[in-house]
Amino acid sequence: MVMTNTHFVSSSVLTPSSKCANDVTPMAQAKRFYPLFAVTGNLAPIVSGKVMSYVISLQKNNDDAGFGITLQTLAVIKGLVCFGIITLYRHVYAMAEDREKKERMEQSLSTIRGIERTGKVEITMKFEKKKEKLTLKQSAKELMKSRELKAMAMMVFCYNVCVELTEVLWKGILRKTFPNKSMYMDYMARFSQTVGVVAFLLQLVASEIINVFGWKWTAMIPPLTMGVLAVAFFAAVIAGEDKIPLAQALLIGTVQNVANKVTKYSLFDPCKEMAYIPLGPEAKVKGKAAVDVLGARLGRSIGAASQQLLVLLVGGGSILNCTPYIGALYVAAIAVWSNAVSVLGQLFESSEDKAKKVDNTPKLESIGQAITIIKSIEDRKREKKKQNGVEVISSGAKGM
């Protein structure tokens, strides 16, 4: 239920919020405000974790009745927040509509002034192409057209598979360590705060990391970091409680899951969006839709389905018994992910080399020649006008 709620919130809140930002933010202000949106968004886990911890601290009894009251309080708070989101959405779109009306009014006044000066009417018409919603089959066909799009889809697919494989195992250990529901929720609240703080700090230096290491090695940081920590986590679980206490395995898993979310928000998502830049206009639109449909959704589904099969076939009903097999799948996903990053890294390097090799000298020379020709033609016209004027004056003098 918790995972279903998380996925629902991700799709029902984050997607409309990004659409709202795209709708109301002018291109001239995008570079200024989009980094601010990202940094501000990382404050949400900190605030939600603090609120959750405070509500849990007010719980008097640790039984089911006390936990039920806590859930009711959190549900009321969530409802108030949702109402605030709806109110802000309406207010933001209303302000954007007022701004558009003012711009249209200014454009109309400017057109009227132009008509008064020149007596000419100029009409500009804009036609927006309707966005196509791709089906699963169309998304697969779109990905097959481009090696780069396939690599991007594989990046997103492998990330979601990796998150699914470690998150379920980690929460299984967490439930075993904290069988009390209130203690479990308090731990998740502190986990949320940690994710928010680390993501906020990393977001501040993410642009510098990209500038120093370049796209390829920055995009390699998430799979390498997640892979190293995941191997340590799987090894701790496989070793058993006799050699490594469950609390230590939980700590390693917590660090690994923090890395999952922090590297996604601060490094993975920016690098993924940058990967669309060298592509053509049609590939950017249809390719992004295809990557979102097949990469993200299919990755989560495959990760969950593989764990369910392992629990039924070899786990004996426990996810902890499937750790070696989950670890093998995880390492394979990391390897495929790293290969996809290498493919896209070659795309970036080749596009940068082409940009450096482009020599605009011939074009500039052609433009210069055209300007010279136009100037000579204009000079000849002026000379002819002068000559015609002189002839008219001379003929008039003779007539006198």
Image (spheres, rainbow, N blue to C red):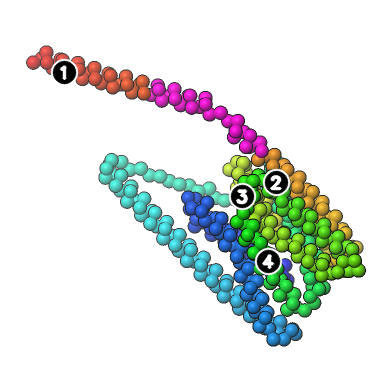
On the picture, is 387 further left or further right than 239? left
Q: Pointer 1: what residue?
A: 393
Question: Residue at left 72%, top 53%?
Answer: 222
Q: Nearer the viewer, mark 3 or mark 1?
A: 3
Q: How far from the left and from the top, in percent, is residue 104?
A: 38, 53
**Of callouts 2 and 4, the N-terminal one:** 4
User: Over which residues does the magenta segment extend?
Assistant: 349-374
Closer to the camera in the image, 117 or 137: 117
Q: Which mark is residue 217?
A: 2
Task: Give the CA distance from mark 3 to mark 2.
Answer: 13 Å
**Of callouts 1 and 4, the N-terminal one:** 4
The C terminus lies in quadrant:
top left
On the picture, is 383 further left or further right than 100? left
Q: Residues within 10 Å of mark 3 (few under 14, many from 20)?
A: few
Q: Residues within 10 Å of mark 1 (few under 14, many from 20)?
A: few
Q: Is residue 144 above or below residue 371?
A: below
Q: Residues within 10 Å of mark 2 (few under 14, many from 20)?
A: some
The rendered magenta stretch, by its main secondary structure, is classed as helix
Question: Residue at left 80%, top 58%?
Answer: 230
Residue 312 lies in quadrant = bottom right
Q: Amino acid at mark 1?
A: Ile
Q: Which mark is residue 208?
A: 3
Question: Residue at left 65%, top 71%?
Answer: 49
Q: Amino acid at mark 3?
A: Glu
Q: Is residue 155 above or below residue 370?
A: below
Q: How far from the left and from the top, in percent, is residue 119?
A: 28, 41
Whether the magenta-drawn stretch holds residue 89 is answered as no
Q: Pointer 4: what residue?
A: 194
Residue 249 lies in quadrant = bottom right
Q: Secondary structure at mark 3?
A: helix
**Of callouts 3 and 2, the N-terminal one:** 3
Residue 70 visible in the snapshot:
no
